[in-house]
Image (tube, rainbow, N blue to C red):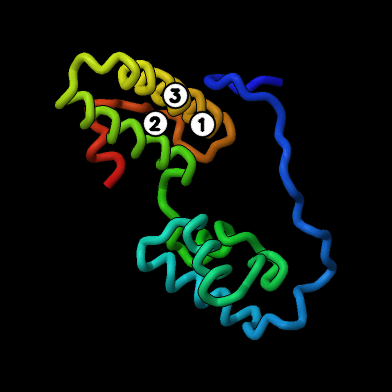
């Protein structure tokens, strides 16, 4: 099936190998990894950034193999996960960036189109999260209050 706002098809790419237990060469134990995730989250990193840091700096290829939980699950348990889901927050940051660009360049048609597509994704994702109970029922995307919502 085709992607919504691009002309791309399919989902190809490599898959991670199936493992029963973490590799023997990992030096960190379960409690240490959970403490690292909590520390990085308190520094303001999101789950994707935490995963990259743990992979590149600490040599932990997959947090779920070591701890049995995803990074977001650990962040939620420790109370350091943001109120908004990460993908929704990233789309809202992108919309804010495009709006700031449009303040300087009012007649940039491709930016206007990009803003329309991004905001439609935000609304669609908001509707999905409301139906799943992740966002409150009265949550509404308001482009005028975007600066306040993201901070």
State left or right for residue 90 relative to residue 71.
left
Q: Position of residue 85 (x, y in %)?
A: 47, 44
Q: What element carries label 2?
A: loop
- Residue named by callout 1: 130
- Residue named by callout 3: 123
Q: How crowded is mark 1: few (under 14 residues within 10 Å), some or many (20 or more)?
A: some
- Residue named by callout 2: 139
The relative height of residue 70 versus residue 104 in the rendered view (above or below) is: below
Of mark 1 and mark 2, the one earlier in the sequence is 1
Mark 2 and 3 residues: CB-CB less than 8 Å, in contact?
no
Q: Where is residue 116 in the image (x, y as percent from the top left)?
A: 38, 18
Q: What element carries label 1?
A: helix
Q: Which of 72 and 59 is in front in this view?
A: 59
Q: Is mark 3 on a helix, strand or loop?
A: helix
Of mark 2 and mark 3, the one earlier in the sequence is 3
Quadrant that contains the N terminus:
top right
């Amino acid at each position: 099936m085709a992607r919504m706002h691009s002309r791309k098809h399919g989902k190809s790419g490599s898959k991670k190998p199936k493992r029963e237990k973490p590799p023997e060469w990992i030096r960190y134990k379960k409690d240490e990894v959970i403490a690292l995730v909590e520390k990085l989250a308190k520094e303001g990193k999101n789950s994707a950034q935490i995963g990259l840091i743990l992979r590149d700096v600490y040599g932990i290829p997959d947090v779920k193999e070591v701890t049995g939980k995803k990074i977001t699950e650990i962040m939620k348990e420790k109370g350091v996960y943001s109120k908004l889901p990460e993908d929704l927050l990233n789309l809202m940051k992108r919309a804010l960036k495009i709006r700031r660009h449009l303040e300087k360049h009012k007649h940039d048609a491709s930016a206007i189109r990009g803003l329309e597509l991004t905001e439609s994704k935000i609304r669609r994702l908001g509707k999905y999260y409301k139906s799943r109970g992740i966002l409150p029922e009265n949550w509404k995307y308001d482009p005028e209050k975007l600066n306040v919502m993201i901070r």
